[in-house]
């Protein structure tokens, strides 16, 4: 199985690139942010819980996120691979993912991180906020908090997979096509 973690701060282009990767590799795309937004849209208990954290730009607690992620993977037993987008975002999430995949006889193939300067992230997210309908893209203070949370809680996940020689950092600026070709090159090297 090709199990890719698409990594990087909010606004680094993970969602855009994931859409293109699905077309090329034909694998399942799981975005925990999208799953939470779906639950929120349906006002489910999980959605209401997630909203408390998402509206502030904080992380949803690990046990909630990990449980939801496992359900989604288990609901797709025939997937030939998975792009994890926005997960794992903490070391406990990474450890839970590793154990979960190991139980299934598979593992993370590679983590590819998109590198984008902070000010570019803020500009991109504010621009996206004009059309995305996402409350967390419309407020500069929340955006800056999401970037700070990425640095304090999420960035270490790069090191977790780097210790196993699985992490790659690629420039996340340029055209969508340029970034996509860097990504596929890094993926093809990792496989
Ligand atoms: P995203 O769409 O990936 O930018 O995620 C939007 C928001 O959903 C984040 O700011 C968090 O509040 C929440 N979220 C998404 N994925 C996770 C995760 N793996 N762990 C905790 N919270 C998450």
Image (spheres, rainbow, N blue to C red):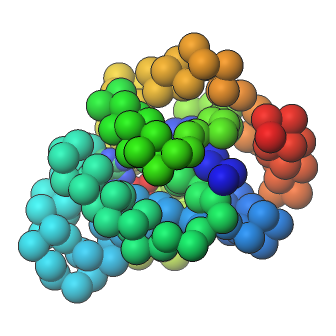
The residue nearer to you, when weighing 132 against 25, is 25
* Residue beneath the point at 49% across and 21% down: 160
Residue 1 location (% of width, % of height): 66, 53
**In the orientation shown, which residue stands out farthest toward the bottom?**
42
Q: Is residue 16 left or right of residue 78?
A: right
Q: Is residue 181 left or right of residue 60?
A: right
Q: Is residue 28 left or right of residue 64?
A: right
Residue 64 location (% of width, % of height): 19, 53
Residue 154 visible from this viewpoint: yes
* Residue beneath the point at 13% across and 57% down: 52
Residue 15 location (% of width, % of height): 60, 60
* Residue beneath the point at 84% across and 48% down: 184
**Residue 186, above or below 124:** above
Residue 53 location (% of width, % of height): 19, 52
* Residue beneath the point at 37% across and 31% down: 95
Residue 45 found in image quarter = bottom left
**Residue 133, above or below 141:** below
The residue nearer to you, when weighing 167 against 47, is 167
Residue 10 visible from this viewpoint: no
Residue 114 found in image quarter = top right
Q: Quadrant of the C terminus?
A: top right
Numbered circles on residues, count = 0
Residue 69 found in image quarter = bottom left
């Amino acid at each position: 199985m090709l199990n890719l973690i698409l990594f990087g701060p909010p606004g680094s282009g993970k969602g855009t690139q994931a859409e293109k990767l699905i077309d090329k590799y034909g694998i399942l795309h799981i975005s925990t942010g999208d799953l939470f937004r779906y639950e929120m849209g349906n006002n489910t208990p999980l959605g209401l819980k997630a909203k408390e954290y998402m509206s502030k730009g904080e992380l949803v607690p690990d046990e909630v996120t990990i449980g939801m992620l496992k359900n989604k993977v288990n609901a797709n037993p025939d997937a030939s691979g998975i792009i994890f987008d926005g997960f794992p975002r903490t070391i406990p999430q990474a450890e839970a993912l590793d154990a979960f995949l190991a139980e299934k006889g598979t593992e993370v193939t590679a983590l590819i991180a998109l590198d984008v300067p902070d000010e570019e992230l803020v500009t991109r997210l504010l621009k996206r906020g004009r059309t995305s309908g996402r409350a967390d893209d419309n407020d500069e203070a929340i955006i800056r908090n999401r970037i700070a949370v990425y640095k304090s809680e999420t960035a270490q996940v790069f090191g977790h997979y780097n210790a196993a020689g699985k992490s790659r950092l690629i420039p996340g600026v340029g055209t969508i096509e340029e970034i996509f070709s860097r990504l596929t090159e890094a993926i093809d090297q990792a496989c």
